[in-house]
Amino acid sequence: QQPVQSPQAVILREGEDAVINCSSSKALYSVHWYRQKHGEAPVFLMILLKGGEQKGHEKISASFNEKKQQSSLYLTASQLSYSGTYFCGTASPGGGTSYGKLTFGQGTILTVHP
Amino acid sequence: TAGITQAPTSQILAAGRSMTLRCTQDMRHNAMYWYRQDLGLGLRLIHYSNTAGTTGKGEVPDGYSVSRANTDDFPLTLASAVPSQTSVYFCASSDSPATGLSDTQYFGPGTRLTVL
């Protein structure tokens, strides 16, 4: 089942912060975050493994709460280059050949204006 | 480094015709994947291959077939295209089949397919 992302869309001014949430109805092993610019391929941002760790680089970070089956992506002091669609991909323990397959959320469109 | 290449970039296809979308990676990754992306639905897995010689069905496999004769190539075939297969198709690869652990999936540039 597809994870649910919220909000569906966010509009920011440069320098503002944003949070994108990803929620699953299934137990999760890991959460992967990707960003996609219009007309381009998705680009990997980061992976979070179960254990509640928070990862990040520069002004983009993320957390993973395995008990709540949720992950959040934090964008701090947004830049114009942050504009795009953000996807979370979740992996659940499944066993067999389906183990580890990613299921992607529907995406969150982030627009940063000057 | 090329990474993943896909061909064609775009295609208009008449309903009922067959077509093969090509995907080649030069990273020697074990696992490869085909996704379709439709507005509002995100990326949905069509088929995958954990290693050369093996394939598996994803979330939306009907109407599609794949083969994995070697490590580098993973073609996707539509035997008899229908308008609902209009979509953007992305090929991806990862170093390990168990992407749930710590793997990154790398995506190709995509093929935009329109079935009329």
Image (spheres, coloured by chain):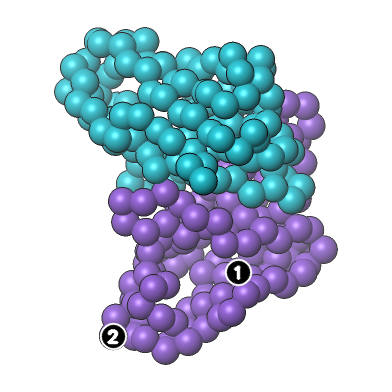
Residue at the location (33% across, 46% down)?
B39
* Between A92 and B70, the one nearer to me in the picture: B70
Q: Secondary structure at mark 1?
A: strand
Which callout, 2 or 1, points at the residue further toward the start of the chain?
A: 1
User: In this picture, is B92 found above or below A90?
Assistant: above
What mark, if any, has residue A72 been given in the picture? 1
Q: Please give left or right for residue A63 compared with residue A40 in the image.
A: right
Outermost residue, front direction?
A: B1
With A74 as the anchor, is A93 left or right in this view? right
Q: Which amino acid does the dot numbered 1 rest on?
A: Ser
Quarter-of-image position of residue A22: bottom right
Query: Mark 1 Cα within 10 Å, few/some/many (few <14, many 20+)?
Result: many
Q: Which residue is mark 2?
A: A114
Q: Amino acid at mark 2?
A: Pro
Relative placement, left or right, of B86 versus B22 is: left
State the hue of chain A: purple
Q: Quadrant of residue B33?
A: top right
- Palette colour of chain B: cyan
Where residue A66 sits, quadrant-wise, is: bottom right
| Residue B34 visible in image | no
- On the image, the x and y values in percent for residue B87 come to 32, 35
The numbered mark 1 sits on a residue in which chain? A
The relative height of residue B102 versus residue B14 in the rendered view (above or below) is: below
Name the residue rendered at 59%, 45% in the picture.
B105
